[in-house]
Amino acid sequence: MAFETSFKFLRGVKKNNNREWFLKNKDLYISAKQEFENFIDNVIKEISTFDNSVSELKAKDCIYRQYRDVRFSKDKTPYKVHMGAYINSEGKKINTPGYYFHLEPGGKSIFGGGFWEPEKDLLKKVRQEIDYNLEEWESIITEKTFKNSYPQGLSKENSLLNQPAGYDKDNPAIEYLKLKSFIVSHNFSDEQIMSNNLLKEVKKHAKALKPAIDFLKKSLH
């Protein structure tokens, strides 16, 4: 089954998030890491059939480290309890619009993407593009396949309470202009993650997302 080893590792590290357990189970981690890399390589291959901008990427360009950065966190546990990969034309270290896959037991796995917390100048460009081309933006995010893949719509997490500077509160695009991120996600149950149809499903949701990613990319130029 898909991700059997990865789930075993992630459940283990959640219960025993310490260096001693990790070192004792290093072989399990290496096997889980390889399993995840193989899947992400296949996801890249499938997305490349309709989005050529990611065709040169390898899994290692996209997968985040398992080790947590605890320097500025109250939580000092050393390891993440999920595996994640950000697939975009520039690789995981550059924040540009792209696709994200998150693997975590307990029904917490997701596929989604968009543009997460762009820096100030880029956020300004995205808002301007939405303001100028609201009809095009809304046609993308209300399109049937998009809504079927992402029925919850755009995440409003950390969005502004009031309109951003330079915009009127009565602007017809105001609910989008308040956003600090432009992201959507589709949740997977553990049973779906273990299914042989997972890659096909991820491809379907990625394809539904591509027009939104193209719009967000266009706004940056």
Image (tube, helix red, strand yellow):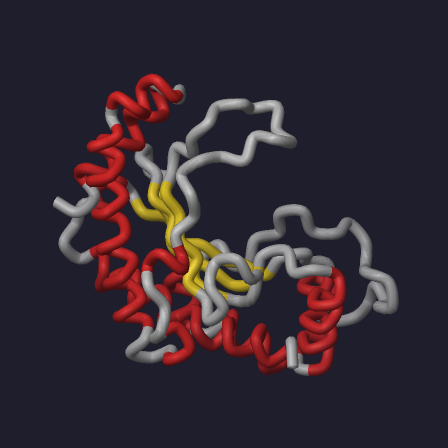
Give the image quarter of residue 136.
bottom right
At 66% from the left and 82% from the top, the residue drawn is 133
Side of 89 where 162 appears, left or right:
right
- Count the marks: how many? 0
At 45% from the left and 54% from the top, the residue drawn is 185
Any part of residue 192 in sight: no
Point out residue 178 in the picture as x, y percentages from the top left corner: 73, 59
Point out residue 47 in the picture as x, y percentages from the top left corner: 32, 71
Give the image quarter of residue 179.
bottom right
Where 43 sits versus 23, above or below? below
Of 95 and 108, nearer the camera is 95
| Placement of the N terminus among the 4 image quadrants | top left
Of 112 and 8, nearer the camera is 8
Where 96 sits versus 179, above or below? below
Point out residue 163 in the picture as x, y percentages from the top left corner: 81, 59
Where 197 sits versus 132, above or below? above
At 44% from the left and 57% from the top, the residue drawn is 86
Side of 162 where 95 appears, left or right:
left
Any part of residue 93 in sight: yes
Where 25 sits versus 179, above or below? above
| Placement of the C terminus among the 4 image quadrants | bottom right
Of 169 and 50, nearer the camera is 50
Side of 154 where 192 appears, left or right:
left
At 74% from the left and 75% from the top, the residue drawn is 128
Point out residue 12 in the picture as x, y percentages from the top left corner: 28, 24
